[in-house]
Image (tube, rainbow, N blue to C red):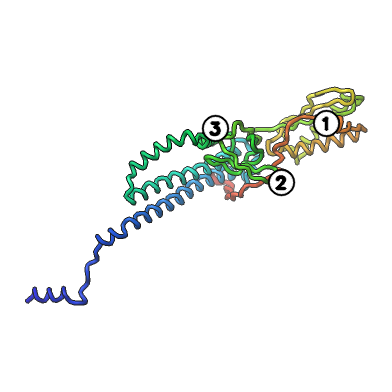
């Protein structure tokens, strides 16, 4: 009797039917696993990028907090090490983000191919053979990658540096594992392959020097002119506005050349790298006023050709480009760090 009731209940129309999981996974298992791989890859990339950005921001914020500034440009008055730490940290963060994206994409691609029943081992082996073959044809790409890694590791340049890399001169906006982006004085963004950079002239590391060659008439009192030039340079260095930019005592190096029409006298001032152009222009204006006060008429420019340091750092202009401010909370007085 009991068996009859159970059999009737099992065959009743309202009886629940067991879900066939085997059939479901046979039909949808591969798409679900592929979607899970892609989702995990995207989430992992987001998490790693967030972690890299967080570390970079903490380092940059720590330096700025220590120097009590919000913008990297304000670190010009700080020790060189602080500026280089900020610039190098941002550069390494940019490179690490690129590396993370490439590695995660490659691993996700291999896992997806495995889910699609491709022979991953054979694919990797074939890719290795093809890669070895392409290495001869893609030497420039490999060269770009290796050169980019070495430039960052050796601190040859960093984000925010004013550099001369041969093909372009300007401010470094981004450093990738293959391409470095440089913005020139006209606002043009240059994408320079790292493998094409044979030498780097970095104008943001350490100090710079203002070199001015002043041509005066041949019959002018050279000693008096030199004294006036030195006095103008010392006056500039002592002015509160420019005192922070000048890091050494100005010098008059003396006569550079003599001709039948003019005498060229050189004055030099050691400055912070970012302030070189502004100090140069201010000193030229002061020298002009000093020679006018002495009643000296400067020779015609058509008869004087001067060669000197190229003002490549003019890319900064009167208003240097600013990085994104990183606000910080100053440490309250009386509280230990």
Question: Mark 2 = which residue?
Answer: 319
Residue 263: image x %, image y %?
Answer: 86, 25
Question: Mark 1 = which residue?
Answer: 231
Residue at (79, 38) in percent of width and height: 282
Q: Alpha carbon of mark 2 to alpha carbon of mark 3: how far?
A: 30 Å
Q: In the rendered structure, which disc, 3 or 1, sits on the residue that comes first in sequence?
A: 3
Q: Alpha carbon of mark 3 to alpha carbon of mark 1: how far?
A: 41 Å
Residue reaching furthest to the left: 1
Question: Mark 3 = which residue?
Answer: 154
Camera-side residue: 229 or 330? Answer: 229
Q: Image check: 140 left or right of 302?
A: left
SS category of the residue bearing label 1: helix
Q: Alpha carbon of mark 2 to alpha carbon of mark 1: how far?
A: 28 Å
Residue at (40, 48) in percent of width and height: 109
Q: Image check: 272 left or right of 62?
A: right
Find residue 201 and report its image quarter: top right
Residue 15: image x %, image y %?
Answer: 20, 74
Categorize mark 3 by other alpha carbons within 10 Å: few (<14), some (14-19), many (20+): few
Marks 2 and 1 close (CB-CB < 8 Å): no
For the N terminus, give its image quadrant: bottom left
- Say above or below: 99 vs 38: above
Residue 61: image x %, image y %?
Answer: 56, 46
Camera-side residue: 183 or 113? Answer: 113
Residue at (78, 24) in percent of width and height: 253
């Amino acid at each position: 009797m009991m068996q009859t009731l159970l059999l009737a209940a099992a065959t009743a129309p309202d009886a629940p039917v067991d879900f066939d999981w085997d059939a479901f996974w046979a039909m949808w298992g591969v798409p679900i696993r592929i979607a899970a791989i892609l989702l995990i890859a995207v989430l992992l990339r987001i998490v790693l990028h967030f972690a890299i950005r967080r570390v970079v921001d903490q380092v940059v914020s720590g330096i700025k907090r220590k120097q009590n500034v919000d913008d990297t440009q304000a670190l010009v008055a700080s020790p060189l090490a602080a500026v280089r730490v900020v610039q190098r940290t941002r550069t390494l963060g940019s490179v690490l983000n690129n590396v993370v994206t490439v590695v995660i994409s490659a691993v996700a691609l291999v896992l997806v191919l495995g889910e699609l029943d491709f022979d991953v081992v054979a694919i990797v082996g074939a890719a290795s053979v093809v890669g070895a073959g392409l290495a001869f044809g893609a030497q420039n790409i490999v060269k770009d990658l290796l050169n980019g890694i070495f430039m960052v590791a050796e601190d040859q340049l960093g984000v925010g540096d004013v550099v001369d890399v041969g093909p372009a001169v300007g401010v470094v906006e981004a450093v990738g594992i293959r391409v470095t982006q440089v913005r020139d004085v006209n606002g043009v963004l240059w994408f320079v392959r790292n493998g094409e950079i044979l030498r780097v002239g970095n104008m943001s590391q350490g100090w710079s020097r203002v070199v001015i060659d002043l041509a005066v008439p041949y019959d002018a009192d050279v000693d008096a002119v030199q004294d006036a030039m030195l006095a103008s340079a010392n006056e500039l260095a002592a002015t509160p506005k420019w005192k922070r930019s000048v890091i050494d005592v100005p010098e008059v190096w003396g006569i550079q050349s003599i001709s039948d029409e003019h005498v060229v006298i050189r004055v030099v001032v050691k400055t912070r790298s970012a302030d070189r152009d502004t100090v140069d222009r201010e000193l030229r204006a002061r020298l002009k006023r000093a020679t006018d006060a002495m009643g000296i008429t400067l020779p015609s420019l058509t008869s004087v050709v001067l060669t000197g340091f190229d003002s490549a750092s003019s890319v900064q202009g009167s208003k240097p480009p600013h990085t994104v401010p990183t606000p910080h909370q100053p440490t309250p007085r009386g509280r230990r760090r």
